[in-house]
Amino acid sequence: MKCIVGLGNPGAKYTNTRHNIGFLAIDALAKEHGIKLTESKFKAVFGTGMIKGERVVLVKPLTYMNLSGEAVRPLLDFYKIAVEDVLVIYDDLDLPLEKMRLRSKGSAGGHNGVKSLIQHLGTQDIKRLKLGVGRPPAPIQVIDWVLMPFAKSEQTTLQHVLSDSVNIATDFIDTPFLALMNRYN
C-alpha cells in the first residue's frame, strides 16, 4: 500500500493559497482516480482507492501545516505503511510556480510541515514532490505570500502544475523513485 500526503492548512480561508498547493494536488489526484476523501480520523481527511492496481491512501492533514506529522504518523501506523511507501507533496518557495522537484530525502529546508513530518516519522528519508510557489515580490513578506491565493494570471500555470503533479504521483505508485526523479527532475 502507498500513501500520498498533500500538506496544507484546513479551512475555507486557506483553500486556494500557495501554502495549500499540496492539498490542491491531492484533490486533483483524487479526482483523476475517483478516490473520495471522505474518511476523517487521525487528525486528517483521507480516502483509499486503487491506482495502477495498487491500494493507495490519499491524505490531507487537518492539523495545520506546522503539525502535519501528528496526523501522518498514526495513519501510517494504522495502515501499516512504511515510510519508504510515502510521497509528500508541498509548496516550495525556492522554486518558481511552474517548477517541481522530486527528492528522496533531506532536511526540512525551512518548511515547518516537513519539519513536523521528519520529527514524527523519525527520519529525513521521506520522498517528496516539491511544487514551486516562488518567492514574494518586495515588499510582501513570506508569511503573507504563502497565505495569499494564487492570482488570476497564475491559474493556467497552476492547472498545468497540478496536472503534472497528478502524473508524477500516479507514476510514484509503480516506478522506482530514482527512475521517477530521472524522468521528472
Image (cartoon, helix red, strand yellow):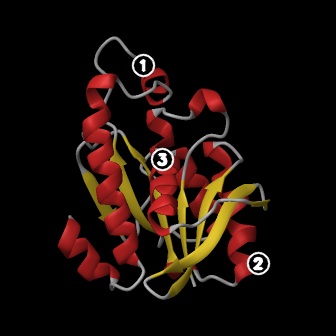
- Badge 1 marks a residue whose secondary structure is loop
Mark 2 vs mark 1: in front? 2
Quadrant location of the C terminus in the rendered image: bottom left
Q: Is residue 88 left or right of residue 35?
A: left
**Distance between mark 3 and mark 1 Cα atoms:** 23 Å
Mark 3 vs mark 1: in front? 3
Q: Mark 3 or mark 2: name the one nearer the start of the chain.
A: 3
- Badge 3 marks a residue whose secondary structure is helix
Q: Is residue 9 left or right of residue 32?
A: right
Mark 3 vs mark 2: in front? 3
Residue 78 figure quarter: bottom right
Q: Position of residue 40 (x, y in %)?
A: 77, 58
Residue picked out by circle 3: 24
Q: Residue at x 68, y 75 (%)?
A: 76
Q: Mark 3 or mark 1: name the one nearer the start of the chain.
A: 3
Q: Which mark is residue 78?
A: 2
